Amino acid sequence: MKKYTHAYLAFMAIKRLQYGPIPEANKADAQSLVKWFHDYRDFVVKGSWYPDEVFKDNTTSHIIKFRPDQHAADHNFKKLPRNMQQYSLGLSSPLYNQPFVIEMGNLADRCESLAHGVIDCLKMLRMEDRGCPISPSNNHIAMRFFILSHYIADCHMPLHCDARPFSDGENIHAFIESQWETQIKKSYQVDTANERFFYDPYGYPLLQKPTSLIQSVEDDILQREFLYSWGTGNSNTWDYMSAVAQYSYLMAYHMIPSEYNEINLTKEVYKKSQQYARFEQDSRIIFCDAIDSIARVWLHAWTRYRSWEKNKK
Ligand SMILES: [Zn+2]
């Protein structure tokens, strides 16, 4: 995914936590996280782009690459919360519960470690006196939240979870991502000189002429049921992101069936395919699920910190 797509997804996750149907039990935590974020919104673009621009760990930590393999021993698919659309779609995939191998990537480990890091930093900040040289700052911690959002979002980009090399040939991977970036830039006012979005009065990216995709995402994140749970059988960020990666892999085959490869799938062929006819619908699923995941992972980290803080008193 490209720069403003990453920033957009992070902003929409904050928006969902603020205005979405957050259950009563999670409301106080969500509201305090949103309040905290509001002081650091100017870091969203930079933070959520840091992994691509600075860390450049793309070939290891931005991916978990699956390949179907009839001889593989592993064929277990995890569960996800019921409101995840990539999950419902994946359950009817011909590759669901079929053997697979993971060829490369440690995205789930990266997310688990970043989530822990955020909680650790919050605790250190709370323990140390203001200005203490070992204390992380709120600015720094906010950056880490946005960095974390990058890896979560990448996991929802189906081709980050598919071992077929669609960045080769005519690079359909980049083509899809640039389609998304165009949608964002068309829909919101971007202050390119200062590398940020212009804001609306509530501090969110200022909508100018939303495309139908962006309008439907804006609507969905405020209406879609919010489930705090990681999904049955998952108990942490690692389990959850590993499950997301599995359904993202199935989504890749839903968007680009197995008869295609990096040679025969030119842009021309892709644009004429029956799969591309539902590109907007698939993009909506990917965006809405990514936003939901970012909000869920963030809220878990924040809630864990808050309960530590409460027990400390
Ligand atoms: Zn990336």
Image (cartoon, grey):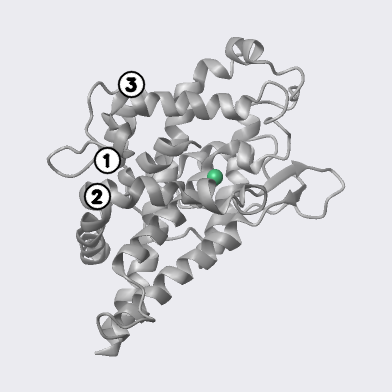
Q: Determine the secondary structure under disc 2.
A: loop
* Mark 1 vs ligand 1: CB below 8 Å: no
Mark 2, Cα crowd under 10 Å, few <14 / some 14-19 / many 20+, is some
Dot 1 corresponds to which residue?
A: 223
Mark closest to the chain's N terminus, 2 or 1: 2
Q: Earlier in the sequence, mark 2 or mark 3?
A: 2
Name the mark on residue 36. none
- Give yes or no for contact between labels 2 and 1 (Cβ–Cβ under 8 Å): yes
Of 12 and 39, nearer the camera is 39
Q: Which residue is mark 3?
A: 212
Residue located farthest toward the bottom when viewing the structure as drawn: 313
Q: Amino acid at mark 1?
A: Gln
Q: Secondary structure at mark 1?
A: helix
SS for dot 3:
helix
Q: CA distance from mark 2 to mark 3?
A: 23 Å
Q: Is residue 239 visible?
A: no
Q: Nearer the viewer, mark 1 or mark 3?
A: 3
Classify 10 Å Cα crowding around label 3: few (below 14), some (14-19), many (20 and above). few
Numbered label attached to residue 21: 2
Which image quadrant: the C terminus?
bottom left
| Ligand number 1: quarter of image | top right
Residue found at x 54% / y 39% = 157
* Identity of the residue drawn at 50% across and 20% down: 278
Which residue is more in the foreground, 179 or 281?
Answer: 179
Depicted 286 relative to depicted 125: above or below: above
| Sooner in the amino-acid sequence: mark 1 or mark 3 | 3
Residue kind at label 2, given as amino acid type: Pro
